[in-house]
Amino acid sequence: MRCADCGTTHPIQKERERLANVRVIVNRDGDSQPYNVNLSAQEELRVGGELLVDDQTKDVVLTKITSLETDRRVERANAREIKTVWARAIDDVTLKVSVYKNGVTRPLNTQASGKDVFERGEILEIDGIRFQVIKIKLRGEGFADRAEAKDIVRVWGREL
């Protein structure tokens, strides 16, 4: 570093970033898998936030944090304080759909990208069944007219 007053160059020592190895339990469709990730020790994680889990020995998974464990359950914490992160995979999700026709409701499941947007009034087709979306239930937030697949619990539709 060069001094602005005298022009002398002084060596400075850059502080190395400390990493924290954090255990992440990722749930995908009821199946939980353990991962280990290295995060900056100062990085703050919070429940509801997204975390890209990049374990060197497994695949890369985009997740939404559902719980943080230090000595107890907390809503937010720095990576160095965390013992376990509990998360749900949101890169690819199973979308649950209930389709109604003539007093009969049929359950359907389909795979969707977590970023796919579904909208009330939209016409969809799953397994050869065409239907119009009439209701979208969100995770812990009631209902919506429009939402990304990663935030949806169930879609209700009326068969056409």
Image: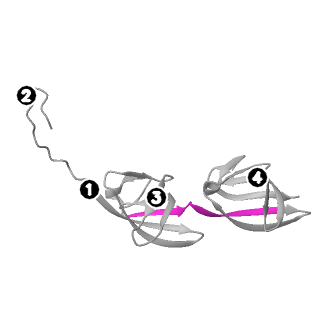
Which residue is disc 3 drawn over?
A: 52
Which numbered dot is residue 18?
Answer: 1
Q: Nearer the viewer, mark 1 or mark 4?
A: 1
Is 154 displayed left or right of 82 in the figure? Answer: right
Which residue is disc 4 drawn over?
A: 135
Q: Nearer the viewer, mark 1 or mark 2?
A: 2
| Residue 91 is a magenta residue | yes
Q: CA distance from mark 2 to mark 4?
A: 71 Å
Amino acid at pointer 3: Leu
Q: CA distance from mark 2 to mark 3?
A: 47 Å
| Label whose residue precedes the other's in the sequence (1 or 2) | 2
Crowd around label 3: few <14 · some 14–19 · many ≥20 (10 Å): few
Q: Are marks 2 and 3 in contact (CB under 8 Å)?
A: no
User: How many labels sit on residues?
Assistant: 4
Mark 2 secondary-structure assignment: loop
| Label whose residue precedes the other's in the sequence (3 or 1) | 1
Q: CA distance from mark 1 to mark 4?
A: 47 Å
What secondary structure do most residues of the magenta stretch adopt? strand
